[in-house]
Amino acid sequence: MYWGVFVPQTLHTQARAALEKEGVTITPPPAPWAFAPTPRARRTVKALIVLVLLALAGLAALQLATLL
């Protein structure tokens, strides 16, 4: 499980000390693929993203064509 805590920059040192005092491990945020999908799953997600973007571009082109 990962939690993010946002504090003003001026209170960063104090907040970090308070969290460490409570035993909270402070680590950098996880990467987008931190759940380690298989290469096939990554390709599938990327392909779906490309298809959605192409569909949106096509719809935008159709809207422009109807306006002209």
Image (spheres, rainbow, N blue to C red):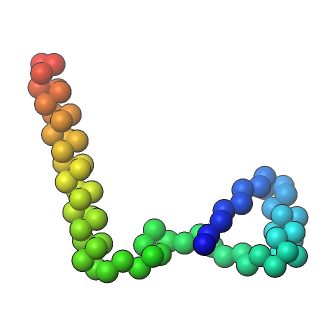
For this rendering, which residue is in front, 28 or 5?
5
Quadrant assignment for the N terminus: bottom right
Where is residue 37? Give x, y as percent. 36, 77
Question: Can residue 64 be spotted in the picture?
Answer: yes
Q: Is residue 12 left or right of residue 56?
A: right
The number of numbered discs placed on residues in the rendered structure image is 0
Q: Quadrant of residue 46?
A: bottom left
The residue lying at 65 percent from left, 65 percent from top is: 3
Tell me: residue 64, above or below residue 7. above
Question: Can residue 13 be spotted in the picture?
Answer: no
Tell me: residue 51, above or below residue 24. above
Where is residue 52? Give x, y as percent. 23, 50
For this rendering, which residue is in front, 11 or 37?
37
Where is residue 58? Give x, y as percent. 15, 40
The residue lying at 28 percent from left, 65 percent from top is: 45
The residue lying at 45 percent from left, 76 percent from top is: 35
Q: Quadrant of residue 48?
A: bottom left
Seen from this angle, which residue lies furthest top?
68
Where is residue 25? Give x, y as percent. 73, 78
Quadrant assignment for the C terminus: top left
Q: Is residue 45 left or right of residue 25?
A: left
